[in-house]
Image: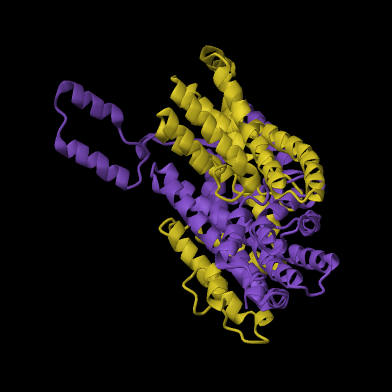
Amino acid sequence: MNIFVIILVLLVAFLAGMEGILDQFQFHQPIIACTLIGIVTGNPIQGLLLGGTLQLIALGWMNIGAAVAPDAALASIASAILVTLRGADVSEGIALAIPLAIAGQVLTIFVRTLTVGIAHAADGKAKEGSFRAVELLHLGALMLQGLRIAIPAGIILAVPAELVTDGLNAIPEWLTGGLAVAGGMIVAVGYAMVINMMATPKLWVFFALGFALSAVGELNLIAMGIIGVVLALLYLQFSPDFNQGGGGGGSSSGGDPLDDILNDY
Amino acid sequence: MDEKNKFKLSKSDRLKVFWRSQFLQASWNFERMQNVGWAYSMIPALKKLYTSKEDRSLALKRHLEFFNTHPYLAAPVLGVTLTLEEEKAAGEDIDNAAIQGVKIGMMGPLAGVGDPVFWGTLRPVLGAFAASLALSESWLGPIIFFLGWNIIRMAFLWYSQELGYVQGGNITQNLSGGLMQKLTQGASVLGMFIMGVLVPRWTSMNFPMVISRIENAETDMIDFAAISEAANEGVLSGDMLRNVVADIQAGMAIQPEEVTTLQNTLDQLLPGVAPLLLTLFCVWLLRKKISPITIIAGIFVVGVIGYVLGILG
């Protein structure tokens, strides 16, 4: 493993760590983070497959208000390193991703507590009216979040490869088999988190309809997406809740609910 | 004219605020949450509007107050606040409490829109679609996810900030009115529908536990012994093979035993019923305030035990 690979892996880890808090460009999402690790380590297909699988598990991991979700960044980066550089299977990577997500969650809570100090330092600099100092403090906190993932990634890289491989091989078959089984079921928690946030009594019928239609194998996800958007638009047009005033909103839309807001704007 | 323009933010000022707002959460902390990020985003505007050290200090302090909302829905609040700051700098009587009041008043309802629309619908739907591509080894998966998300996100950040800037205080009225509610409800319909589709398709649960074994009568079975004998003696003919295929198509058994697993029974009942029940159970647990991590740990335990006992596989 040459030095460039190490630097690139650490860079990707740093990027994922920053995005883990920013939640903007989504470099911390498994499908991006694992794929990037796969590319820089020369095992792109493994990274892609791991990313796709982990993405399904992490669908519902979201930070709402002050609540901190399991951390997709550390889970993606660390398990991608183990899979692409240390010979773990994709299924082992998934099993390891869950404890890693919890570890990442603990780490981000730690950094988010440290940054209370940064907020107070910013108060002090505000008294002096120094924009520059406030900016530097803010970006410094971002660096801390980057290191939160880059340091664990560095530690995993520093541990001798044989040690990691021996450790992985030492896991008994009943455990890996069981974890693989559990890995297939864990997706349900993510779905439940999303459903739990959106479900109102009126909306369960759409869940039921989706469940029934899912048995029709010919309908792929794009077709399902179209059906879903049509349902949403019909619902908005016909639901009495929205028909006091103008009504018919979104009929000019090209399909994406965001178009509505842009059209209205 | 010049005097008035001094207190007007140009498009490039607003673009700088837009760019910086992407780093809103960099120093997210448990005490005042997005407060430093908010001040960081406002700095290009404050720099232009206030020149004396004293004014700058007051402005910074004003914007280091508590703030927290969905990171994208901060954009319209920023837009409104930019207008307020322009007016304040031009000498209108707007006190700190008024500005903080607008921020606090907007952040709650807006977070209530952003969470279901972005985290609850757009990311799971786009993520699931991209993941399905990735699992078939297509590079389009991550590419579509990255480009799709960021184009939508950046367009939203910029246009909603401009909307807030142009409309000023009126925006709160617009937002609490029909538009935002429609967006949230429409997104939730789509999200619930897609979740219904995904639950049985992508949760993999298999119960290989054997419920019954029925021995097939010899007359119902294809006589493989005769075929292998014929093959060994070199007298296997096309007609014999044709007969075998015809027999299979006619429903004759291939195995000496008919094995029915728990999974076969469940599939006959309703395909995907086990993932459905698991998901609903998880929703119920979440509503009982059980943390997701506890549920995940529980599923691991169940998975390992089920696998060892041969119920799950």
Residues B126 and B104: in front is B104
Q: Residue furthest bottom?
A: A245
Residue at the location (41% across, 30% down)?
A43
| Image quadrant in which you'd find residue A176 | top right
* Position in image of residue B134 (x %, y %): 44, 44
How many marks the image carries: the answer is 0
The C terminus of chain B lies in which quarter of the figure?
top right
Side of B72 where B206 appears, left or right: left
Q: For chain B, what colour was chosen?
A: purple
* Position in image of residue A153 (x %, y %): 58, 27
How was the colour assigned to the protein in this rendering? by chain
* Position in image of residue A200 (x %, y %): 71, 65
Residues B158 and A106: in front is B158
Residue at the location (62% across, 86% down)?
A246
The N terminus of chain B lies in which quarter of the figure?
bottom right
Residues B16 and A216: in front is B16
Side of B247 where B273 appears, left or right: right
Q: Report if residue A42 is visible in the image.
A: yes
Residue at the location (58% across, 58% down)?
B16
Quick check: B90 above or below B13?
A: below
Side of A241 where B152 appears, left or right: left
Side of A1 where A16 appears, left or right: right
| Image quadrant in which you'd find residue A172 | top right
* Position in image of residue A249 (x %, y %): 57, 80
Quick check: A57 above or below B16?
A: above
Q: Report if residue A208 is visible in the image.
A: no
Instruction: Output the letter for the chain in yellow.
Output: A
